[in-house]
Amino acid sequence: MKISSLTGFESHVLQTPINFPVFVAGKQLVASIDEIVDNTCVAEFHIWFSDGYSDYFTMTESGYVEGGRTVPSKRYAAGIRADLTVLIFLSPGRKTWNFRYRESNAWILQGLSGTLDLYFDGDYRFHLYKEADKWRVHDTRLTPRDIDETLVKRAIEVIDRSL
């Protein structure tokens, strides 16, 4: 963690960038986050793309994703919108997993207390935890939904493979 000389806010440079697949204007690319700037009101993510483009992106309170270079960043912002909806909950230094599932990215984020929360298509789905060497699923929403068992199995495979 350092104070960014450009913005004066806290900057978290990630030791290992977080890579994830995206579609930008119909073209499949890989997006990589290598820095998160916390300006107390909103997080800014430095994201570079496999085609060489990079910018700082933020999510507004109304849910729009914006880049600093407004016009060229619009098509990239559209490609990462669902992912940034989730990544605003990212805790630097905590484990993060992502995988493709049904045409979207699924994300598993380790929270500050060590919990594992799964998000899919930009929305919280459920909480995963291990109890007596067995994975358990718990939906912490006020109005629980049906849990996609195939998504649960896939998430557990991804986590177990990395441990």
Image (tube, grey):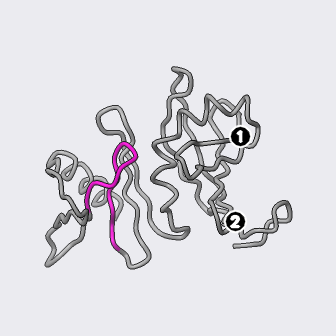
In percent of the image, x 64 and y 64: which residue is there? 41
Element type where label 1 sits in the image: strand
Q: In the image, which disc is placed on residue 39?
A: 2
Q: Earlier in the sequence, mark 2 or mark 1?
A: 2
Marks counted in the figure total 2
Determine the image quadrant of residue 1.
bottom right
In percent of the image, x 63 and y 60: which residue is there? 42
> Would you call the spot at circle 1 few (<14 residues within 10 Å), some (14-19), or many (20 or more)?
some
Residue 69 in the image, given as x and y percentages of width and height: 76, 37
Overall secondary structure of the magenta stretch? strand
Q: Give the extent of the magenta segment.
A: 115-126
2 or 1: mark nearer the eye? 2
Relative placement, left or right, of 99 versus 92 is left
Rendered position, 159 above or below 56: below
The answer to whether residue 127 is magenta is no
Rendered position, 94 above or below 124: below
In percent of the image, x 17 and y 66: which residue is there? 135
The answer to whether residue 119 is magenta is yes
Relative placement, left or right, of 47 versus 7 is left
Residue 115 in the image, given as x and y percentages of width and height: 33, 72
Identify the amino acid type marked 1. Ser
Q: Nearer the viewer, residue 162 or 38?
A: 38
Q: Are marks 2 and 1 in contact (CB under 8 Å)?
A: no
Residue 93 in the image, given as x and y percentages of width and height: 54, 70
Q: Which residue is mark 1?
A: 54
Identify the amino acid type marked 2. Asn
Q: In the image, which disc is placed on residue 20?
A: none
In percent of the image, x 73 and y 35: which residue is there? 70
Residue 141 in the image, given as x and y percentages of width and height: 25, 62
